[in-house]
Image: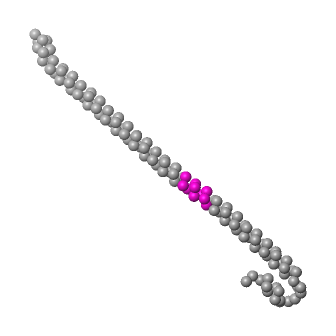
Amino acid sequence: MISAWLTKAARPVIIVLLLIGAALFLGWLTIATVNGMVERAVSRTKAESDARWTAAIEAANTKAASAEAAQARYALDLERSTSAKIDALRARNEELETQNAALPNGDDCGLGRDRVRLLPH
């Protein structure tokens, strides 16, 4: 009789404990699901941010490489232009020296009218 009474009295307690256990399990499952969702959202946001910054860095690197190539082309053009001007000046100098040597009275002291004409104006 006592065991029947104990069993009758224990049933509601066992049911309440089972309900509490089920509620705790469902609460833990809910928290785990929410944590998983948060972790996925964080990793997706981080991946998107990394992709955006990677693209921005690549664009900046491309722009810098393009500017560097343009500067190198400009330097080569400038060097060619300068070399051409220097060559023209050397040729003109040699021409003037030849004309000067061809003038009569090369041993005279001072400048004659013909030699003055060879000077640049």
Is 24 placed above or below 47 here? above
Towards the viewer: 52 or 106:
106
| Residue 69 lies in the magenta stretch | yes
Residue pictured at 28% horizontal, 32% vertical: 30
Towards the viewer: 13 or 98:
98
Q: Using the rendered view, name the quadrant where residue 43 is placed.
A: top left
Prevailing SS of the magenta stretch: helix
Q: Position of residue 27 (x, y in %)?
A: 26, 31
- Quarter of the image where the C terminus is located: bottom right
Residue pictured at 65% horizontal, 63% vertical: 75
Is 80 placed above or below 64 here? below
- Quarter of the image where the N terminus is located: top left
Q: Position of residue 42 (x, y in %)?
A: 38, 41
Q: Position of residue 56 (x, y in %)?
A: 48, 51
Residue pictured at 52% horizontal, 49% vertical: 58
Is 45 placed above or below 23 here? below
Q: Using the rendered view, name the quadrant where residue 84 is placed.
A: bottom right
- Count of labels shown? 0
Q: Position of residue 71 (x, y in %)?
A: 61, 60
Q: What colour scheme does the image use? A: one colour
Towards the viewer: 2 or 120:
120
| Residue 120 lies in the magenta stretch | no
Q: Using the rendered view, name the quadrant where residue 103 is placed.
A: bottom right
- Seen in the image, is 109 located left or right of residue 27? right
Q: What segment carries the magenta color? A: 62-71
